Amino acid sequence: MKITAKLLNDKGACRDQVALFEKHFPKGATVTVARCVAVASLFNWDWAAYNLLSVDAREAYDKARAPALEAYKKACAPARGAYNKACAPAWEAYDRACAPALEAYNKACATAWEAYSKACAPALEAYDKARATAWEAYDKARVQAREAFDKACAPAREAFDKACAPAREAYDKACAIAFAKAATGNCRTRERGD
């Protein structure tokens, strides 16, 4: 199977992935295990499998990557638990920070909706205006709360990413190999030097 930027664009790949592909393979590339492994961490292999492979090849890909996915999940489970625990207070703070703005938004919308129900067109205009103002206030509070959440979770996210990096690398490599083998019809479970 040969992959080109045109093929990726025709299949609806995101611009970033197409640009990355063009950077590494400006003339396109024939799929091989070695090529896929060399860029294992760069591309979304699930997207590639579901958009570029036949149904049979996609099934072979899913079967080949399943053990790696389970190993990745198992390796990351403790880090994910620690991340979720570390971020729980930040989520609570986020929800608390957004609650007044959301309540005000809902209150403003309820009042405007009632007016709309009574007088239709003029009320719709009032509703839209009140909604826009309330939404702006809510959105501002939400953005500030999200920034606080991200800041609070950054150390936990960093620890999670660090803990999962070896498992992610192994998973990406397994997906790259599975994709290459499925794309080339070489679905043997034993890996050769190809």
Image (cartoon, grey):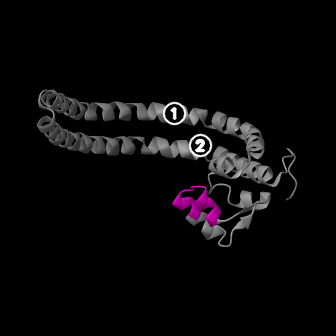
Residues at circles 2 and 1 in contact by the CB criterion of under 8 Å? yes
User: In the rendered structure, does residue 14 fall within the stretch colored magenta?
Assistant: yes
- Residue closest to the eye, 62 or 34: 62
Mark closer to the chain start, 2 or 1:
1
Rendered location of residue 148, percent (x, y): 32, 43
Q: Quadrant of residue 107?
A: top left
Mark 2 element type? helix
Which part of the image, by quadrant, shows the C terminus? bottom right
Q: Residue drawn 61% across and 47% down?
A: 165
- Residue closest to the eye, 35 or 163: 35
User: In the rendered structure, does residue 4 fall within the stretch colored magenta?
Assistant: no
Q: Which residues are magenta?
A: 5-18
64 in relation to 119, above or below: below
Q: Amino acid at mark 2?
A: Ala
Is 81 on the left or on the right of 110, as rendered? right
Per the rendering, the mark at residue 72 is none
Secondary structure mainly formed by the magenta segment? helix
Q: Which residue is mark 1?
A: 82
Q: Residue drawn 68% across and 45% down?
A: 171
* Cα–Cα gap, marks 2 and 1: 10 Å
Q: Which residue is mark 2?
A: 163
Rendered location of residue 160, percent (x, y): 54, 42
34 in relation to 88, above or below: below
- Residue closest to the eye, 146 or 76: 146
- Residue closest to the eye, 174 or 75: 174
